[in-house]
Image: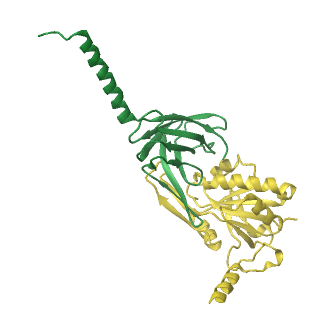
Amino acid sequence: MKWACLGLLLVSLGCSDSDAGLLDFQGIGGDFTLTDEQGQKFSLAEHRGQVYLLFFGFTHCPDVCPTTLVELQEVFQRLGGAGQDLQILFVSVDPERDTPELLASYLQPFDLPVIGLTGTVSQVEKVAQAYGAFFEKVALDSAAVYTMDHSTRSYLIDGEGKVRYIFRYKDEPERIAQIVRKLLP
Amino acid sequence: MRSLPPLSIFVFALSLLIACSHEQDATAGSPGAVDVTAAWARPSLPPHENSAAFFVVHNRTDHAVQLLGASTSRAGVTELHHMEMDGDRMRMRRVPSFTIPAHGELVLEPGSNHLMFFELPAPWVDGEKVDLHLEFDSLPAVDVLAEVRPL
């Protein structure tokens, strides 16, 4: 029974440990098309060769999203020159409020190579589903009117568009930089 | 009717004074019954519609104290919010009050309890100070300044 559990764990992690840290995830991730903060179509399939760190958030997010963006700045500081080959994808889980213009102004103060992505609710839902992410609109008795409960994982995507690592909200910038560096030239 | 001798008036006045100061103690607590330290706020981000503030409240009394509400001249609306992680899911809710246990403290910090501000008439910028007015259930309100600094 113990071994069966361990076996299941290894399968679920897709544990090919040859890259020392990088993983393969069966059935998680994949190509998608959304709209970037300039209002242009962004299709992951058209960017082979580019390494991305993708996460889900929204501009009315008071706490986790700005914190994640600040921590990503720290990741880039640790990466130094190698960071020029990494880009961030910020996928809005609140496309009803997050227009391309709003995403552009929200992300502008951060010193980050970040692309803000939005779309229709169903487009964003499809991306979240493909990546095993979760979001839900929750009405609030508040001036915020509503909030979005959402998952806080970040996905490291290699040049072939495959997810190679999933980071948790609590992961330290140093650890993220260490793993991301394995994919950078 | 015989007029009261001056000494009686003095004693009466004195006893009134003592009674008054006692009454103030009973309702308002001694100075420093609640201290607020380490107050700071994060800068607002475009489109500068909201921000958040964090601090620590120390309760030096023998009874639990409720933080019931807050306000600032720098926002139209101030609310108490609680954020929690359920596994890797972020969940944020408005709450009616925060409790500071007797001889305990309440910590407001990123990723947890915070004051949330809406309807900012102007952006909150690094380095400036934001006035906070905190209201408690059984104690006088406390005014503090929160410095705006990066997360």
Where does the image place residue A154, in percent across and percent down from the top left?
68, 64
For image coordinates 63% across by 39% down, the residue present is: B148
Residue A21 figure quarter = bottom right
Q: Looking at the picture, tell me which residue is in the foreground, A66 or A115.
A: A66
The chain letter of the yellow chain reads A
From the viewer's perspective, tell me whether residue B1 is left or right of residue A23.
left
| Residue B83 location (% of width, % of height) | 53, 56
* Quadrant of image for the N terminus of chain B: top left
Q: Is residue A38 visible?
A: no
Nearer to me, B7 or A37: B7
- Tell me, yes or no, if residue B26 can be seen here: yes
Would residue B135 appear left or right of A97 to someone viewing this image?
A: left
In the rendered view, would you say A93 is above or below A129? above
At which x and y percent is residue A130?
A: 64, 73
| B27 sits to left or right of B88 | left
Residue nearest the observer in this picture, A179 or B3: B3
Colour pattern: by chain
Where is residue A175? Give x, y as percent: 76, 63
Q: How many marks?
A: 0
Q: With respect to residue A30, does B146 lie above or below?
A: above
Establish if B87 lies above or below B46. below
Give the colour in which the image draws chain B: green
